[in-house]
Amino acid sequence: MVQQALSPQVSQDGAFVAPEAPASIAVVGVGGGGCNAVMRIMRERQVPGVKYVCVNTDIKSLAQVRGAAVVQIGERLTRGLGAGGDPEVGNQAAETDRLDLKRAIGQADLIFITAGMGGGTGTGAAPVVAEVARKTGALVIGLITTPFSWEGSRRLQTAMAGAARLQEHVDNLIVVHNDRLLELMSTDVSMEEALIRADEAVMNGILSVAELVNVPGEINVDMADVRTIMKVPGQALMAIGEAPGPHGAVEAAKQAITNPLLNLAIDGAQGALFCVNGGPKMTLGEVNAAGQLIASKVDHRAMIFFGMVNSDKMQDRVRLTIIATGIPEEKQRSRDASMWQRGPVSVGVSQPPGRPARTVVTGKSGSYSANPITRI
């Protein structure tokens, strides 16, 4: 493949320096839920440097995919009819087509594996896909959804077992709780709308990180920064706040770190990375004030990285994305009976007053053993 040459730049000492290329990111949807999420991401927002892959046993589902690489796994095993809700079938299907998975995923700096837990292909195949991805040397983040409570305890137990297996092969695991999303919506919401919201939760989690490293800004965050923060042992959270007005950066930071929907507090975190995205009138002073607020909450020895992006599209609004890692166990909040207590990463999205929160997710960082994930 022929690639365009990058134009050299000149440093202060006169040396020629090649500009940094955008981080390569792959988003891999596994099973029906994962593929649906990938297709929604592709329709809604375009982020440079992102490659999309859909993996499924169901040939009819894959026939609907446009613009992404497609991998049909277990063709001889399932004859293209899906895994029948059996994770073992999904697992075997992925095992038989590891080489095709490796070719489709290729090389990337950051790989997201997204799937719906509780069924056959997503639950069973996602751990194999993640294992293949991690062997490439990429930073691998799992982003999964859990069943609605009315789908029954058996499906929930299947989802929990699948999440535990996936956790062995990812650097961070983020879990979107469908029941929690429903609590943020009116009782008369349609099933289609509920599923769309779940896809949006996955989309926002993925794109917040992708845009963090690949959208040029006045002060940039790069892939090395994300990798450094994600590798800090301990629990982690990722959150987004958004607010209007002259003090929008500080208000967005407050929303992100005090979001009542998070089951973790940022206090004592050993690492933090945040990026502020605002309109052309946003000042460095605003960003500094937001940074001071975050620094006052994390451990005084914490590593802190930050970035700043000015965008005309933001107008008078400011959006702040933060990733905090190395959070002590005692900082976990036990707020909500619908959350899994021992989740790896906690993620929340806050909006200005009058707008509903868009997503809440929880998950884990640091130790990658398959600790039991319990529900309280």
Image: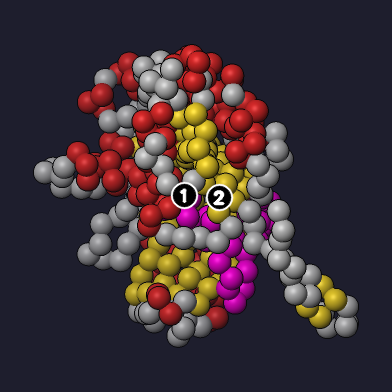
Residue 238 in percent (x, y) is at: 49, 51
Residue of label 1: 67
Q: Which residues are magenta?
A: 202-228
Marker disc for residue 137:
none
SS category of the residue bearing label 2: strand
Q: Nearer the viewer, residue 167 or 346?
A: 167
Q: Residue at point 59% right, 58% down?
A: 49
SS category of the residue bearing label 1: loop
357 displayed left or right of 308: left
Question: CA–CA distance between discs 1 and 2?
Answer: 10 Å
Residue 63 in percent (x, y) is at: 39, 36
Q: Residues within 10 Å of mark 2 (few under 14, many from 20)?
A: many
Assess whether residue 210 is covered by the magenta stretch.
Answer: yes
Q: Nearer the viewer, mark 1 or mark 2?
A: 1
Marker disc for residue 51:
2
| Amino acid type, label 2 | Lys
Does label 1 or label 2 sit earlier along the sequence?
2
Rendered position, 302 above or below 136: below
| Amino acid type, label 1 | Gly
